[in-house]
Image (spheres, rainbow, N blue to C red):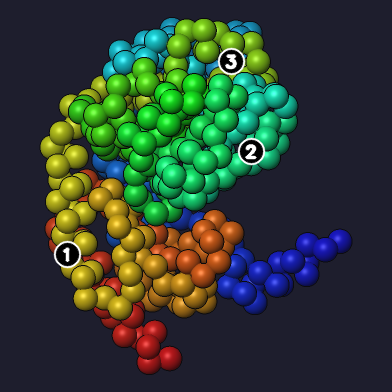
Amino acid sequence: MPFNLSLAERDAAGLKRSLPVIDRVSGRQLFSHGKTYLNFAGNDYLGLSQAPELITASDAAAREFGVGAVASPLVVGHQAVHRQLEAELTDWLGLEAVMLFSSGFSANQAVIKALLGKEHSLWQDRLNHASLQEAGLLSPARMQRFAHNDMAVLAGKLKPHSGLIVSEGVFSMDGDQGDWHGLTRLAGQSGNWLMIDDAHGLGVLGTQGCGTLSEQGIASHKVQITMGTFGKALGVSGAFIGGSRALIDYLHNHARSYVYSTHLPPPQAAAILAAVRLVQQADDQREQLQQRIAQFRHGTAQLPFSLLPSNTAIQPLLVGDEQATLQLAAQLREQGCWVGAIRPPTVPKGSARLRITLSAAHTAADITALLTALEKAIKHSRKR
């Protein structure tokens, strides 16, 4: 079998992934093997994963409903807590209807594979998440990728009334936002549908945390399909697809990862519901997060590596070389800062980076500690 050779090659190139074992993690801290680290690798942007309200809601639902949904939602798995969560999501985000999924990956796969046939076209931003790119490859539709946020290139590829344009609200590895004014304009002109993956914008951006469309002043009805996740700013896990009632009815019948999967556990749905309510009132946390982002970006101005242009919680420090990226991450860990080292194929070759993520739970002192650790790590790497 070829896998041993493949793993050896990846290891030599600094591309082999490993699975760290930790004891506990929150938006601010990570505990592993008796040590405490500042956590700059997670997606708990508002620090809600440890919120007492979520824990209380989950515990109460476990006592009332049990810990499992028992079956798929279309059999006996859909309960009152699921229906309440769907209702509050539609009210919050201005959608006609939503449906719940166990993960953003399964939600993205479900939509693209259920909606598109061989007669359709699919246009994707080149930096879209792997779940979207893979779904496009697996679907019978003709998929074309366009240069990141390049509306001129997209305009040249579009065919009228023939398919779906998909982009992200906030791009998970670069931290910048999609050009949703340009996307809605081109979709309207060409008569094609639009889908937003707002996994990293939901809860963090816009009025009441409604997400990227709200942040950019775009009405939700201009985008036919919305995907959002509960595992980032909402601090839990799972996802939803939202849109028209007709779309959701269709997906109830044709989205295979929904029809044939056990539903979200009721305690999980209850925790998400508590998070939805908290997020709408979290203006102070969103403001605090913006302060931490500004502090970090100001503090990195003199570093020898480029910080990609991002005003979101995702702050990528571009290193380039894979081994150097791993070494910097290891040096930061020795100084008590846990940072993700992102390498190909997750990002393009030559663009390995430290994916530094910030949370409203971080203090100003935490950011100062990270900046100090970065300076020391870079100096150490230059001495090698």
Residue indicated by mark 1: 298
Q: CA distance from mark 3 to mark 1?
A: 46 Å
Q: Quadrant of residue 219?
A: top left
Residue 112 versus residue 339 in the image, above or below: above
The amino acid sitting under disc 3 is: Leu
Provide residue 57's location: percent of width, then percent of height: 33, 22
List the single residue furthest toward the right: 1
Q: Residues within 10 Å of mark 1 (few under 14, many from 20)?
A: few
Residue beneath the point at 44% across and 16% down:
243
Residue beneath the point at 43% across and 53% down:
173
Q: Answer yes or no: is residue 235 visible.
A: no
| Residue situated in front as seen by the camera: 148 or 339 | 148
Residue indicated by mark 3: 251
Of the two numbered discs 1 and 2 in the rendering, the one whose residue sits closer to the viewer: 2
Q: Give the SS element for disc 1.
A: helix
Q: Residues within 10 Å of mark 3 (few under 14, many from 20)?
A: many
Say if mark 3 contacts mark 2, CB within 8 Å: no
Q: Of label 3 and label 2, which has the lower sequence position?
A: 2
Q: Answer yes or no: is residue 91 visible.
A: yes
